[in-house]
Amino acid sequence: MTDSAAGRFTAADRDGPAGPVVEVTGELDYDSAPGLRTVLRRALAVRPAPPKLVIDLAGLTFCDSTGLNTLLQARIDAERQGTVVRLARPTPAVARVLEITGADQVFPVDPGLSAVVPDTRTD
């Protein structure tokens, strides 16, 4: 967890339905990107390599170019080991950054909660 000058930033990993989930909140910028990098590396270090890593962006209020580069680098690192990185629940501001930069074309983006919470229905 990192305090950024512009706002509080946190990144934490947990087990999800199909692999690790990294929950990101606050402002992702130059000051906070190293904290996210550390959490992403830890999530990707699991052996055997998980088939999927979900980055939950529901609490992310801001993302600058350094933050975006951190996400893109995590995608590259994950692909090297056969893990797919999915972005989940981006806030409107972050979704706009992904759209403007074209990152929404290289990441699978799940707008809903189903990407981070297992389906508990018993049909």
Image (cartoon, grey):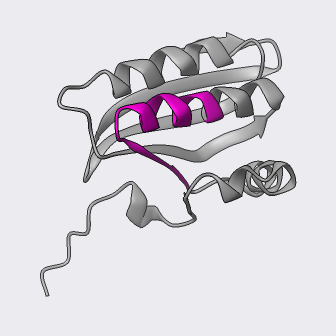
- Looking at the picture, how far across and down is residue 38, in whole percent? 49, 14
Compared across the picture, whether 34 is left or right of 20 comes to: right
| Number of numbered discs on residues | 0
* Residue ranking furthest to the left: 122
- The residue sitting at 36% across, 27% down in the picture is 44
Q: State the image quarter where residue 67 is shown.
A: top right
**What residue range appears in magenta?**
72-88
Residue 60: within the magenta? no
- Between 86 and 73, the one lying in front of the other is 73
- Between 46 and 3, the one lying in front of the other is 46
- Looking at the picture, how far across and down is residue 32, in whole percent? 68, 16
Asked whether residue 28 appears in the rendered view, the answer is no
Compared across the picture, whether 112 is left or right of 33 comes to: left
- Looking at the picture, how far across and down is residue 119, in whole percent? 25, 69
Compared across the picture, whether 116 is left or right of 87 comes to: left
- Between 49 and 86, the one lying in front of the other is 49
- The residue sitting at 64% across, 23% down in the picture is 9
- The residue sitting at 35% across, 32% down in the picture is 81
* Residue ranking furthest to the bottom: 123
Q: Is residue 50 above or below residue 29?
A: below
Residue 84: within the magenta? yes
Asked whether residue 21 appears in the rendered view, the answer is yes
* Residue ranking furthest to the front: 80
- The residue sitting at 14% across, 88% down in the picture is 123
Q: State the image quarter where residue 37 is shown.
A: top right
Q: Is residue 21 above or below residue 43?
A: below
